[in-house]
């Protein structure tokens, strides 16, 4: 049985901590998802950037559909799913790179990287972006964790 390589939750305490962090900001979730804090296309690019790092097939599918609704082209969606940012709007590239870095560090980005993004977008926008990043990261890790359970129960036949 080959090794399961996608990122998962390792302990229940991680799930609880992520859930608590998101619930502490639940008053901002509706405005975020309704496009009042971040443009919907920009939000979907951020979510696809994080999902490309974590490799959640469920989130990749769902956010590709949402990205289409938000007006993002098929070519750009495919590129984002592969972790390629070159086809995205130039003014969003620093945020998308930050999103990838944020995911790679499991939500603990380098303070200097965060400072540079804050300089460009402002604290309020970066805080809203990080809520989106934290939300998709939790979704990614939950999906991957479920796939890991399927993988283990099926001796590697499902969920890989």
Image (spheres, helix red, strand yellow):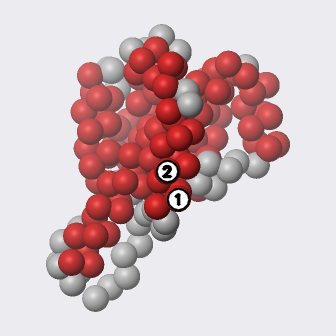
- Give the residue number, with chain letter if any, for mark 2: 16
Image height check: is 129 above or below 50?
above
Q: Nearer the viewer, residue 99 or 34?
A: 34
Q: Mark number for residue 52? A: none
* Front-most of residues 131 and 83: 131
The residue under the point 76% across, 42% down is 113
Residue 15: % across, % down: 47, 53
At which x and y percent is residue 45?
A: 45, 33
Can the viewer see residue 86 in this picture? no
Answer with left or right where residue 136 lies relative to residue 133. left
Q: For the residues labelled 2 and 1, say whether their Cβ atoms are less than 8 Å apart.
A: yes
Pick the quarter of the image with the C terminus: bottom left
Q: Residue at x 39, y 46 (%)?
A: 139
Instruction: Kindly state the secondary structure of the residue where label 1 is placed.
Output: helix
Left or right: 94 with respect to 8? right
Q: Residue 12 placed where, x, y %?
A: 46, 61
Q: How busy is the neighbourhood of tag 2: few (under 14 within 10 Å), some, or many (20 plus)?
A: few
Q: Which quadrant: the N terminus?
A: bottom left
Decide if residue 116 is on the left or right side of residue 139.
right
Q: Residue at x 52, y 59 (%)?
A: 13
Q: Image check: 79 left or right of 25?
A: left
Is 60 placed above or below 29 here?
A: below
User: In the rendering, at what x and y percent does residue 25 appear?
Assistant: 55, 27
- Label 1: few (<14), some (14–19) or many (≥20) C-alpha neighbours in 10 Å: few
From the viewer's perspective, is residue 147 above or below residue 53? below
* Residue 123 visible somewhere in the drawing: yes
Measure how far apart labels 2 and 1 are at the Cα level: 5 Å
Residue at coordinates 51% horizontally, 35% vertically from top-left? 22
Q: Please, is residue 67 above or below residue 16 in the view?
A: above
On residue 13, the disc is: 1
């Amino acid at each position: 049985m080959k090794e399961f390589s996608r990122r998962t939750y390792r302990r229940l305490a991680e799930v609880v901590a992520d859930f608590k962090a998101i619930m502490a900001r639940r008053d901002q979730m509706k405005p975020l998802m309704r496009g009042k804090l971040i443009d919907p296309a920009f939000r979907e690019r951020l979510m696809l950037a994080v999902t490309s790092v974590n490799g959640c097939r469920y989130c990749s599918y769902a956010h590709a559909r949402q990205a289409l609704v938000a007006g993002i082209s098929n070519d750009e969606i495919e590129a984002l799913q592969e972790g390629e940012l070159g086809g995205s709007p130039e003014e969003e590239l620093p945020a998308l790179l930050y999103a990838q870095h944020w995911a790679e560090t499991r939500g603990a980005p380098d303070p200097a990287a965060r400072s540079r993004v804050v300089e460009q977008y402002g604290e309020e926008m970066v805080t809203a972006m990080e809520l989106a990043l934290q939300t998709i990261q939790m979704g990614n890790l939950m999906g991957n964790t479920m796939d890991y359970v399927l993988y283990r129960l099926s001796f590697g036949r499902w969920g890989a």
